[in-house]
Amino acid sequence: MHELSLVMSLWDIVNQELDEKKYKKIEKIYLSAGESLGIINEFFETSFDAVKSERPETKDTKVVLTTEKSIVRCNNCQEQWNYIDSWYLCPKCGLADSEIISGKGLNISSMDVE
């Protein structure tokens, strides 16, 4: 369950924002996650619910998680495809020399704060 480690990394950022900007409350956090992360939303939300009560500013915070398509590019022939269709094997030239060029991380899109 890697969702917990992702939440803990997110929590580090949230704590830093709270300490620096002195928000009274974070109502919602909007996240975009690349599909290559394989996040299971229910596990992610359960993990976040477990840590959000650590601070009064986040005890009622909601998380909105949007999945972003992960696009892969072949380093040999430059073909691009959706990660879900083939993880690393190029559908054009057949080589396994590729990299994810978009949709590969977990990003905070915005936050509703008070």
Image (cartoon, rainbow, N blue to C red):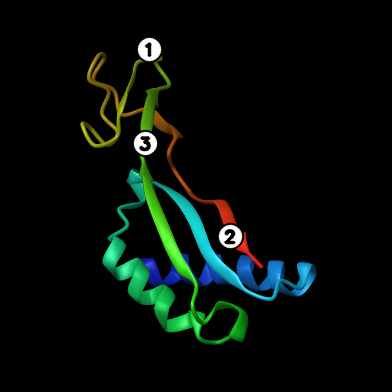
- Residue closest to the eye, 97 or 68: 68
Whole-number angstrom distance, CA of label 2 to CA of label 1: 43 Å
Work out whether mark 1 precedes mark 3 in sequence or the reverse, and give the earlier one: 3
Q: Is residue 1 shown to the viewer in this render?
A: no
How much space separates mark 1 and mark 3, taking CA atoms? 18 Å
- The correct choice, above or below, for 29 with respect to 22 in the image is above
Q: Amino acid at mark 2?
A: Asp
Are there few (<14), some (14-19), or many (20+) residues within 10 Å of tag 1? some
Report x, y in % for residue 90.
27, 23
Work out how far the residue at label 2 is from the one at label 3, CA to CA, in angstroms.
Answer: 26 Å
Residue 1, picture quadrant: bottom left
Within-10-Å neighbours for mark 2: few <14, some 14–19, many 20+: few
Note whether 36 is above or below 113 in the view shown. Answer: above
- What residue appears at the point 27 percent right and 60 percent down from the top-left corner? 40
90 sits left or right of 8 in the view: left
Relative horizontal placement of residue 109, taking residue 25 as reference (left or right): left
Pinpoint residue 23: horizontal percent, then vertical percent: 71, 71
Query: Circle 1 sits on which residue?
Result: 77
Residue 73, above or below 87: above
Describe the element under mark 1 as helix, strand or loop. loop
- Amino acid on which disc 3 is placed: Ser
What x and y, as percent, mark residue 61?
A: 50, 72
As drawn, the label of residue 70 is: 3
Residue bearing mark 2: 112
Q: Nearer the viewer, residue 85 or 112?
A: 112
Mark sitting earlier along the chain (2/3): 3
Task: Determine the secondary structure under disc 2.
Answer: strand
Give the position of the C terminus as an image quadrant: bottom right
Q: Nearer the viewer, mark 1 or mark 3?
A: 3
Which residue type carries mark 1? Cys
Question: Which residue shows up at 61% across the image and 79% down it?
Answer: 57
